Every structure is written in C-alpha cells, then in structure tokens.
Image: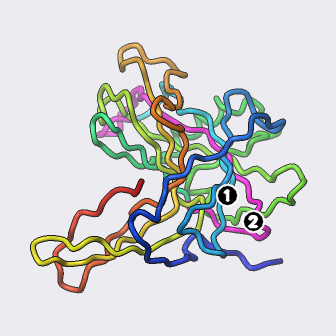
C-alpha cells in the first residue's frame, strides 16, 4: 500500500500576486451518486499547484438551522440554535491521504469569523436527524457521520477511477450564531484541509520600513451563502448558496500564516488573493 501523504506535505512557490487566481469549482450537471439537495465540487487545478498536490472531491448540503438540546455557560440545560453543514469527501488521487478539516464561517456583512465546534452532545442529535438508519442494530447508521475531529484520525482511502467512490461523511457545526453574529445574511464558509497545496509568497514592501514578509497560503474551498430571513423567522433550509455575483463555490489559495523576521512585530495578513 502506498504511504499516506498528509495535508502538511506542501509545494512551496513564491509567485507574483497576479499569478494566483480564484477558480470556480466545477460541478457536473448529473451525478447518480448524489442525494437530493447535495452539491458536488470537483478538484480544480490552480496556478500555484505543484505536481505533487492532491485535492479531494467534496460534496455538501447548504448549512441547515436546527434547535437542539444544549447547556448554558453554567452547565444548565437549555435550547440552542445550531447551524450545521453535512458533507462528504472522497479521494481519487491514487494513494491514501489525511484530511484534517477546518471549517471557518466568515460573515461578509458583519466581518466576524467562527470556527466549527464539534460538540459531541450536539453532534449526536444532528447525526440522528440526518441519518434515519441509526438503530440499536446499526448504531453508526449507513452514513457513519463523523465530527471534523474524528474524520482526521484515519486516512481517506483512494477510490478507483471508475468505481463507486469510497465516501466519508461528516458534519461541521456552529452553535449560538444568533448571539455571535446577529442578523447576518451573507457569509462564506472556507474549507481547509481538502488539499495539501501550500504556497509561500512575498508581500509588497510594508511601511514604515519597507519590510517584506512571507505569506503562507493554503489551497482552500470558499463557498458563499445567503440567508434571506432573520433570526426571528428562521427555518431549517433558509440558507442557500449565493451565486449572485459569481460562482458560489471557488478554489483559492488563502493566507493562513504570516512569517516575519525574528523579533519583528506581528503584521496583519491579507485574507486571500483573487
């Protein structure tokens, strides 16, 4: 069996700012393996991709809104509003790869950022809602849904080119969004870990000393969403992909780290390159 490659493996490239594009994620018109409401995102080759860069296939349903049993800050039982995204990945790279997912929800109207929160108690409730085959005889159900932490513990095995894909299913969850980002109607979800693509790029000279810093960028899937309703009237399927000003799904190289000379003060890094 081929050795497992991890998402830490990287192709390092220092390129011009204009060389990195944002590429629409291709979605075939028909797919006999998809579920109703599911969107399928194929890998896309980007200018900064090297020969050894792999990218997983990704499927998702738009985030849903659900009331679940939870706890307040003191540990007392209370109802919570959870947003969650059902997703699947599969691997056509020819070798097993490790998927270490990060789902970051960024509101474009409020400028807030929220990482996935895989709380086990909340996850189990949503898991049972999404997979109705779960039973005493089949406790994991047919989908075998996993948290974003659990899904990183085993490599994603390669599927043969013409065979039914070996799907791995998961849930990304955000809780209490009404309090954290009240009345947000536009946001993007950035999915990192779907590829081992990494690029290092030098910034333009920065004031006051014309210092040049290195920007570490990771290949990322950006998905834009719109929610036309508000927190008072929210429904489970309110959130939909936002393709009003371009494709809802786009592959990009997004800044994850800024490397500065030792002893230098930290500098805010640009979010992404278009």
The residue range painted magenta reads 71-100
In which image quadrant can residue 270 be found? bottom left
In which image quadrant can residue 81 be found? top left
In which image quadrant can residue 109 be found? top left
Q: Residue at x 80, y 53 (%)?
A: 166
Residue 159 lies, in percent from the top left, at 82, 59
Q: Does the magenta-highlighted stretch encompass residue 98?
A: yes
* Closer-to-camera residue (245/217): 245
The residue at which mark 2 appears reads as 93
5 relative position to 182: left or right? right
The residue at which mark 1 appears reads as 56
Q: Residue furthest right?
A: 162
Q: Residue at x 56, y 53 (%)?
A: 148
Label 2: few (<14), some (14–19) or many (≥20) C-alpha neighbours in 10 Å: some
User: Number of labelled discs?
Assistant: 2
Q: Does the magenta-highlighted stretch encompass residue 81?
A: yes
Badge 1 vs badge 2, beta-carbon distance below 8 Å: yes
Label 1: few (<14), some (14–19) or many (≥20) C-alpha neighbours in 10 Å: many
Can I make out residue 134 in this image? no
* Closer-to-camera residue (233/220): 220
Residue 83 lies, in percent from the top left, at 47, 33
């Amino acid at each position: 069996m081929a050795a497992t490659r991890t998402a830490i493996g990287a192709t390092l490239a220092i390129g011009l700012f204009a060389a990195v594009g944002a590429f629409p994620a291709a979605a075939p018109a028909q797919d006999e393996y998809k579920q109703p409401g599911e969107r399928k995102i194929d890998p896309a080759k980007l200018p900064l991709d090297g020969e050894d860069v792999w990218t997983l296939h990704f499927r998702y349903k738009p985030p849903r809104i659900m009331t679940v049993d939870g706890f307040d800050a003191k540990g007392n039982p209370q109802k919570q509003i959870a947003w969650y995204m059902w997703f699947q990945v599969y691997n056509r790279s020819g070798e097993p790869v490790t998927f270490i997912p990060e789902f970051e929800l960024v509101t474009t109207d409020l400028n807030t950022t929220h990482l996935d929160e895989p709380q086990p108690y909340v996850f189990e409730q949503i898991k049972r809602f999404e997979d109705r085959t779960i039973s005493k005889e089949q406790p994991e159900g047919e989908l075998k849904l996993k948290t974003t932490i659990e899904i990183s513990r085993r490599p994603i095995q390669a599927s043969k080119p013409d065979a039914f894909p070996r799907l791995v299913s998961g849930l990304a969850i955000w809780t209490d969004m009404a309090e954290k980002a009240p009345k947000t109607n536009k946001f993007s979800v950035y999915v990192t870990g779907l590829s081992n693509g990494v690029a290092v790029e030098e910034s333009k000279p920065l004031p006051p000393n014309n210092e040049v810093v290195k920007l570490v960028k990771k290949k990322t899937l950006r998905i834009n969403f719109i929610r036309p309703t508000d927190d008072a009237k929210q429904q489970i399927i309110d959130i939909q992909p936002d393709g009003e000003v371009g494709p809802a799904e786009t592959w990009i190289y997004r800044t994850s780290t800024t490397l500065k000379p030792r002893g230098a003060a930290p500098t805010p890094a640009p979010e992404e390159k278009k």
